Image (cartoon, rainbow, N blue to C red):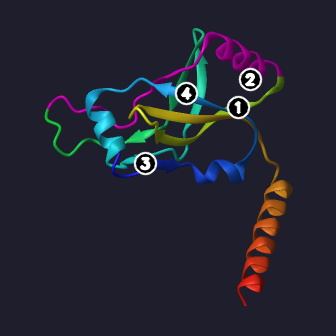
Amino acid sequence: MATEINIRNKRASFDYEFIEEYNAGIVLTGTEIKSIRAGKASLVDSYCYFHRGELWVKGMNIAEYKLGTYYNHQEKRERKLLLTKKELVKLEKKVKESGLTIVPIRVFLNEKGYAKVRIALAKGKKEYDKRESLKAKDAKKEMDRAMKR
């Protein structure tokens, strides 16, 4: 691969505390993978949900492919995620019993060129947790600045 594709959901790490992370395959059409390879995707406001024992991602935006004709895809359609049956059962149980959610945090291409989605089982942060995250981030920036001097 000539370029490294790494599309992140930066907002997710601010809003959620990640408990477990998984790499999932994603079912795409031909023009969608071309748009991802061009880096034209966004995970802002996207989340995962279960429907009939399958995991789906909703709100993921993959821009229309410039050179696609009438075969082009819908930008915000729901896409199926691929995990092992064991992982699906485990995640579904945790989401139902404890009020956790699943958020996509990263889209990338693996060494074979397949698009993968990094998902996280996450717990929502409270307002004071977000303030603590900002304080820690600011303190780290100050430390880095002091080290450079």
Mark 3: few, some, or many residues within 10 Å (few <14, many ≥20)? some
Give percent across and percent down for residue 46.
54, 39
Q: Counting residues from the N terminus, which is met first, the one under dot 4 or under dot 3? A: 3
Identified by mark 2, the residue type is Val
Would you name the residue on which mark 3 appears?
5
The spot of residue 142 in percent (x, y) is 77, 80
Q: What element carries label 2?
A: helix
Q: Earlier in the sequence, mark 1 or mark 2?
A: 2
Residue type beneath disc 3: Ile
- Give the secondary structure at mark 4: strand
Q: Name the residue rendered at 83%, 25% in the picture.
A: 98
- Number of the front mark, 2 or 4: 4
Which numbered disc flags the more N-terminal residue, 4 or 1? 4
Find disc 4 in the rendering and name its residue: 24
| Mark 3 or mark 1, whichever is nearer to me | 3
Mark toward the start of the polypeptide (2 vs 4): 4
Q: Where does label 1 land, which residue?
A: 101
Residue drawn at x 76%, y 83% as measured from the top left: 147
Residue 87 covered by magenta stretch: yes
* Image side of residue 105 versus residue 122, left or right: left
Which quadrant holds residue 139? bottom right
Q: Give the range drawn in magenta.
A: 70-97
| Front-most of residues 129 and 41 | 41
